[in-house]
Amino acid sequence: MSDVVSIELLLDDASEAAVRADWERLRAAGHSSLAAHTAPSNRPHVTLLVRPALAPVAFGEALALLPVALTLAEPLVFRHGDRGVLARRVTPTEELRRLHEAVHAAVPPGVDAPHTAPGDWTPHVTLARRLRLDALPDAVGVLGPVRAGAGVALRRWDSATRTVTAIR
């Protein structure tokens, strides 16, 4: 999928600051990091849904479930050849699963991106893309600790128009 629309869960201020600190530590250590992506739309988030297209939808039931507790857990890697996406796993609690299900229940059937569909969802917050796998031990070593936090808001990202819209 090249142009996509995603529905994302934004983090509370302290959790967002912790993820941004991980981004900065990775960059300072000379690793790939989302700190290098300086667009205003670049914010730590948990992706709940990704589709090639999505008409505007009301997410009332999902919004009613916020805030949702979450844990920014241990690092995980989505491997692609000799590189990978380094992320912080988000513990899939029942509360978080209900939010994910409510987002998907609000939209018509469609083609979901891998790792976002119900039953295949891997909740995570991305730290770095295209990280060399041979640098993984050092990169993981600079990350901060596991921490509890909350998901507090939803937003829609449209990659074709490069726009972010708060979902209220």
Image: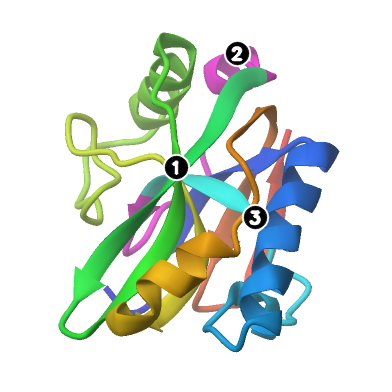
Secondary structure beneath dot 2 equals loop
Q: Quadrant of the N terminus?
A: bottom left
Q: What is the C-alpha distance between the residues marked 2 and 3?
A: 20 Å
Q: Which residues are magenta?
A: 50-67
Residue behind mark 3: 44
x, y percent for residue 119? 17, 30
Magenta-span inclusion, residue 51? yes
> 18 and 167: which one is in front?
18
Helix, strand or loop at label 1? It is strand
Q: Position of residue 59 (x, y in %)?
A: 55, 28
Which residue corresponds to the image point at 44% horizontal and 57% vertical from the top-left? 87
Of 22 and 56, nearer the camera is 22
Name the residue that disc number 1 marks. Answer: 74
Work out whether 89 lies above or below 61. Answer: below
Q: Please tell me whether mark 3 sits on a helix, a strand or a loop.
A: loop
Kindly report which numbered mark, 2 or 1, lies closer to the viewer in this rendering.
1
Asked whether, in this view, residue 83 is left or right of residue 86, the answer is left
Tag 1: amino acid: Glu
Q: Residue at x 50, y 78 (%)?
A: 160
Q: Which mark is residue 65?
A: 2
Badge nearest the viewer, 2 or 3: 3
